[in-house]
Amino acid sequence: MKIGEVLAVLIIIGIITLVGNFIGANIPMIDAIPGMIFLIVISILGVSCSKVIPVRIPAVAYIVTIGCIITIPGFPGSAVFNAWAQKVNFLALATPILAYAGISIGKDLGTLKKTGLRILVVSFVVFIGTYIGSTIIAQLILKLIGEI
């Protein structure tokens, strides 16, 4: 996708998120607009980095890295950026993104059918492994800090 197309998709997702944010979290749209613009700018910067930098790293990695750096306490403006981002509810943000992912998967349904039962088995193994791994890590950390 070209940057203009990515920007258009992000703006549409941003508008849907603002509506969901207002309905679900009762945060006025006008209050959440700076946070939404902030998230869109970080996303565009990350996508641009993935296109410009010759190393094949997914755009998500750049987006997360830029977001982490910009919001680190002590970074100029981080308090303002964090305040803006806190006005955008995560669930309101996740809804249009998951809908977009569902539509994307839906267009490749033929390929998904060809993988058949294998994809189901692999998915279950990944989900179970992730759950067990997270549980073990949580158990260890809680024991180390004396909570259990």
Image (tube, rainbow, N blue to C red):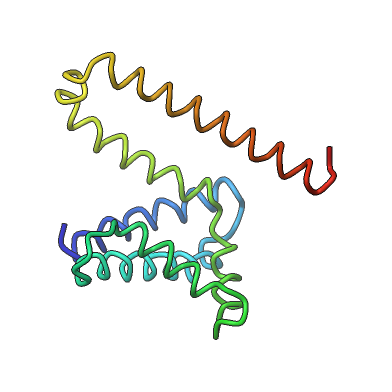
99 left or right of 1?
right
Q: Residue at x 25, y 65 (%)?
A: 50
Q: Quadrant of residue 98?
A: top left
Q: Quarter of the image containing the N terminus?
A: bottom left
Q: Nearer the viewer, residue 26 or 48?
A: 48
Q: Is residue 9 above or below residue 4?
A: above
Q: Position of residue 25 (x, y in %)?
A: 60, 50
Q: In this figure, what is the number of numbered marks?
A: 0
Task: Looking at the picture, tell me which residue is in the foreground, 139 or 86.
Answer: 139
Residue 119 on image: x %, y %: 29, 22
Residue at 57% from the left image edge and 29% from the top image edge: 132
Judging depth in this view, the residue of 8 and 49 nearest the camera is 49
Q: Is residue 34 above or below residue 57?
A: below
Relative image position of residue 137 (x, y in whole percent): 64, 40
Spot occupied by residue 55 in the image (x, y as percentages of width and height)? 22, 65
Residue 82 appears left or right of 19:
right
The residue at 58%/70% (across/down) is 82
Instruction: Look at the picture and state if 92 lies above or below 99.
Output: below
Position of the C terminus by quadrant? top right
Tell me which residue sits at (32%, 60%) in the image: 11
